[in-house]
Amino acid sequence: MSFSSSRGAYPLSRPRRLRAADFSRRLVRENRLTCDDLILPLFVIEGRNEPQKVASMPGVERLTVDLLAGKAKSLVELGIPAVALFPVVDPSAKSDDARAAYDADGLAQRAVRELKNAAPELGVITDVALDPFTSHGQDGLMDDNGYIVNDDTVEVLVQQALSHAAAGADVVAPSDMMDGRIGAIREALEREGRVNTQIMSYAAKYASAYYGPFRDAVGSAGNLKGGSKASYQMDPANGDEALHECALDLREGADMIMIKPGMPYLDVVRRVKDELKVPTFAYQVSGEYAMHCAAFENGWLNREAVILESLLAFKRAGADGVLTYFAEEAARLLRDL
Ligand code: PBG
């Protein structure tokens, strides 16, 4: 059928004009996703040469420490700037006082040394929180009433952060949501002469149901006493409070801030970036990953296209980077585009 392309009766402004050809779509494209935007979360376990699958996160494996060197090298080759490390410790290493968290020869500390030895140029970010190490699976120390106490927890977090820095971590990332922990950690790092250890604060971390698969992956779900982290993680109903939390952490010495979860909280990413104009990251969490994978496996969504679109959305919302379990796959897709 042939139509006239001009009838003269329409407005002079035709947004479709710039969309008509690839050259102009490329010229006016506002945001780009590159491998520089990606941070891969890595689960690490004890043992030798024995990767373990995570049932609720298809394609994600927990790696034994000896497998980290190979992984680190392949990530550098893919151009991924950094990993976020999560230790999965044996139940026998868990206690009420979480003392394994700051063991100089603990799983996280050994994993950091292994990664930095194998690939010094790969940034290593460590998780500062007690949940892998507490017998109750909460991020802090629990009093007799089941309340997660703040200031005593902060003291343990400081020890944990110092032990990560001593092992060679480039960035410590407190994900525990205790009040005042960024200031306490920054001060301790300065005191120890670790002036260039960076802090990426999980500044606005919500009490989200999207963390379910992660808790399976680190084995903290089954034993999560109290069931909820709502007495320290943020209420999903709140947006203004995220700005307050981020501003506090920056004042206390955070170098970068993070919003978590990701996709359901893109409004928060945008508001934080607009207001504070600091390096802002978002975490596409385990539940978001699992949800996407379920749709891919059922053939309901196109895997490659949706992975890239979901990550580009973070850039459009103002994020400087994304922690994502899709990091390696996305880096490969971007390379082969
Ligand atoms: C624990 C921690 C959690 C995640 C990162 N660090 C879970 C939680 O707070 O229960 C979640 C990451 C994910 O779901 O992918 N401090």
Image: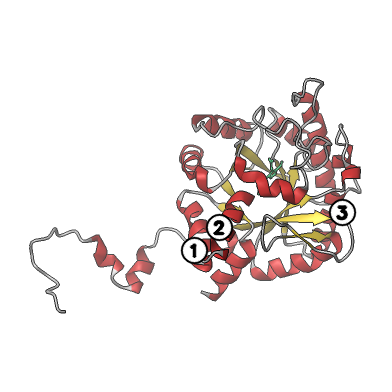
Q: Amino acid at mark 3?
A: Arg
Residue 193 position in % (x across, y down): 81, 41
**Which circle's residue, 3 or 2, is located before the other in the chain?**
3
Say which residue appears at 60% left-offset and 37% top-offset: 206
Rounded to the nearest angstrom, the CA distance separating label 1 from label 3 is 39 Å
Whether residues under marks 2 and 1 lie with C-beta atoms below 8 angstroms apart, the answer is yes
Q: Residues within 10 Å of mark 1 (few under 14, many from 20)?
A: some
Which residue is most to the top?
145
- Given this view, does label 1 or label 3 mark the residue nearer the observer? 1
Label 3 sits on residue: 110
Q: Residues within 10 Å of mark 3 (few under 14, many from 20)?
A: some
87 up-or-down from 224: above or below = below
Q: At numbered mark 2, what does the secondary structure look like: helix, strand or loop?
A: helix
Q: Amino acid at mark 1?
A: Leu
Label 1 sits on residue: 301
Q: Residues within 10 Å of mark 2 (few under 14, many from 20)?
A: some
Residue 194 position in % (x across, y down): 79, 43
Rounded to the nearest angstrom, the CA distance separating label 2 from label 1 is 8 Å
**Which circle's residue, 2 or 1, is located before the other in the chain?**
2
Say which residue appears at 68% left-offset and 55% top-offset: 56
Rounded to the nearest angstrom, the CA distance separating label 3 from label 2 is 32 Å
Which corner quadrant of the image does residue 172 belong to?
top right
Label 2 sits on residue: 292
Which residue is most to the left?
8
- Given this view, does label 3 or label 2 mark the residue nearer the observer? 2
271 up-or-down from 320: above or below = above
Q: At numbered mark 1, what does the secondary structure look like: helix, strand or loop?
A: loop
User: Can see residue 302?
Assistant: yes
